[in-house]
Amino acid sequence: MTYTVAVRELCEFTAKQGDLDLRFTPAPTALEGIAGHAVAAARRGKGYRVEVALAGSYQTLQVRGRADGYDPEAQRIDEVKTFKGRLDRQPASHRRLHWAQAKVYGWLLCQQEQLAHIDVALVYLDVGTQQETVLTERCSADALCQHFEAQCQRFLTWAEAQMTHRAARDAALCTLTFPFGGFRTGQRPLAEAVYKAATAGRCLLAQAPTGIGKTMGTLFPLLKAAPAQRIDKVFFLAAKTSGRQTALDALTRLAHSAPHLPLRVLELVARDKACEYPANACHGESCPLAQGFYDRLPAARAAAVAQGGAPWHQAQVREVALQHQVCPYYLSQELARWADVVVGDYNYYFDMGGLLHGLAQANQWRTALLVDEAHNLVERGRKMYTAELRPTALAEARRSPTATRHAPVKKALDKVRRQWVALDKAQTSAYAVHDAFPDKLLAALQQCGSTLTEHFAEHPTEPDPALQAFYFDALHMVRMAELLDSHSMVDVTQPTKPTTGYNRKAAAPGDSLVCIRNVVPAPFLQPKLAAAHTSTLFSATLQPARYYADLLGLPEDHLWVDVESPFAAAQLQVQVARHISTRYPHRSASLAPIVALMARQFQMHPGNYLAFFSSYDYLQQVAALFAQHHPDVPHWCQSRRMLEAEQREFLGRLTDTSQGIAFAVLGGAFAEGIDLPGNRLIGAFLATLGLPQVNPVNEQIRERMQALFGAGYDYTYLYPGLQKVVQAAGRVIRTPSDEGVVHLMDDRFGQAQVQALLPAWWRA
């Protein structure tokens, strides 16, 4: 058996030394890097070869990669690196890594072309000036062979351990049995669909009701399929912390049911949750866990792997990291290379610079995706590929110490401000949509980005958080402007004062919000989905399937399964209050009927209820009237911007023996992802269809959806709204023994079009 490794991965394992140094230094974007490589290649001679595929072996190790360029006439191999700023500030550790990679490519080429010697060149190309700095070393084939074998030997022990682990993992997965003995109703067809999709290498969209055990019903079959499908990694991607925890709990249950299963499970968490020294900068001169990080990393990595099948959850990674005095956050990123299952947030894969997607591409892993609560990916995807310029960010950057001391920085920021003011002065309404990003503002942002890039490169030890924040905003805006198409729109929103009349401007020019607003994330998500061998996107609310396929960029040949509910209609009374309208003009008239209905239900069947409303204002109006007329009924309300501890306290009042009504906002923290089985929750009131607010932004989205899909109102308002309703109502029935009631308090719930989007097992 051979172990295959990429040249870059090999050298990053063997040649990295010294401190972890994440002081901000500007780096070329992927597009700038590609363009820079093309510039370097175009300057070479006629016979110059680019992207030269190379491979070689050492004992059981297979090494492969692509050299950037080879000049047969000069007998020189090039390793091209693009950069910004000053090359003389490049850390010595980076240069060592670059030489290590270049010399491995040099040996592979000598071996392939039967060369006795070769010139190995590091070609550093400044993407700003297009100037090259070429460092060349003439190497004999024998010397390059020794270098290659030394790198391989350092890696080989690890590689052999990896092969042993992989063989044991796959053998154990082949004999793995379902940990609960039998499947729940609905769980088996879900598992079968996931397994078949993995076997066929397809994408699956799976709608499965809440309470059947979707997490285990997707993880188990995918792990069973992994050996035959040669799957290297399973990425379980969740929208919220609760989803990650559910996955970790399921994997722990699997481990307990199969004690000899050597499955490496890694939890990835956000940097702010893993950082031990949040007040320190992330480099060796400031943080003790960054100092000598790469020197201590091998021992920390080995200690983590030596734990066998023990999970690498946040607490476990932290324990190992602190034992070896390395950063827990970056240790977890290193362990992602060696894990079998990685559990993390959507952004780790789907974001523009997603860690897991980048590692998978660099190492050519065969991956499988599980996307939990996939209905959330529409809005999360939009946010990932939306760019905003906020006037406060620019104002803070202009007031920053750097701007006051350095004239070029101030001049560049002032030019952005002038173009922003000019844009606002030309706008005649509070909200406007542009056919393209304004040319003059874009040019100012590009120039500002270049100026700030040069400044940061010249002053790497002068951190300026306000200036860096605006710099990142500007870079993201420029990047999204380059990618602008029908999937996004450019809009400018100027703040208004409601008391001054509709659309009357009340703010000074330059105080607008400039946005490239992504509407359809499909073009960005589609390549990420296509890169995986198989993917399953699952949720209790994926109706209609076409809507999610269109907006998430699912391949045309994707599979669809709608798992039948295990719950009987008799378990859930669904009642439509056709005499109530919660439309905005009817809000005042709806208060008394809603209060009366809620009180009547509570008196008939005392217990715990959740009541959902479309806004905090509406919630407070109903709660105030309810308290006035029914002071004897316990009730409590969700407040704006609740902290995690406050959320836990809110839910903690719903116990098996308590009684009361909890008022919450639809689409908020308590409308999905919470589990309140049995008497903890026996009913829900929904005083809303969940429709997004009708405003200029949503109306523009509706027009764009109409143009793209021919269903503007449904795609913008109806489908997203009812998805929230079904999610919230799904809190009531969680187990086969649960019983409860859902009151849909709006006459529109009686409409045929709306009824068709509610779960089939409901009898509304």
Image (cartoon, rainbow, N blue to C red):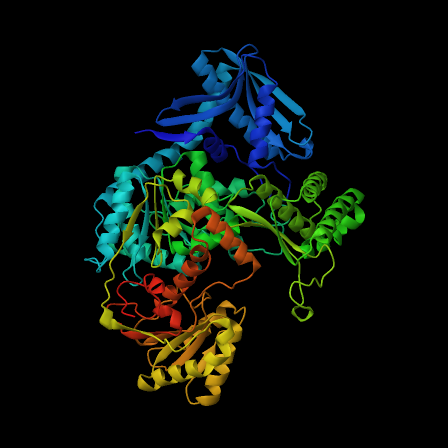
Res. 236 in view: no
Counting from the top left corner in percent of width and height, residue 136 is at 61, 19
Q: Residue, x 66% and y 24% (percent of image)?
A: 133
Horizontally, residue 723 falls left or right of residue 137, namely: left
Residue 79 lies, with reference to residue 400, above or below; the image says above
Q: Residue, x 67% and y 52% (percent of image)?
A: 465
Identify the image quadrant of the C terminus: bottom left
Residue 428 lies, with reference to residue 595, above or below; the image says above
Counting from the top left corner in percent of width and height, residue 65 is at 45, 26
Identify the image quadrant of the N terminus: top left
Of 287 and 587, which appears nearest the observer? Answer: 587
Horizontally, residue 500 falls left or right of residue 98, namely: right
Of 518 and 489, which appears nearest the observer? Answer: 489
Counting from the top left corner in percent of width and height, residue 313 is at 41, 54
Of 458 and 721, which appears nearest the observer? Answer: 721
Residue 426 lies, with reference to residue 210, above or below; the image says above
Furthest-left residue in this view: 182
Res. 29 in view: yes
Horizontally, residue 176 falls left or right of residue 110, namely: left
* Residue 18 figure quarter: top right
Horizontally, residue 468 falls left or right of residue 693, namely: right
Residue 121 lies, with reference to residue 754, above or below; the image says above
Of 158 and 7, which appears nearest the observer? Answer: 7
Q: How many marks?
A: 0
* Residue 316 figure quarter: bottom left
Counting from the top left corner in percent of width and height, residue 620 is at 51, 78
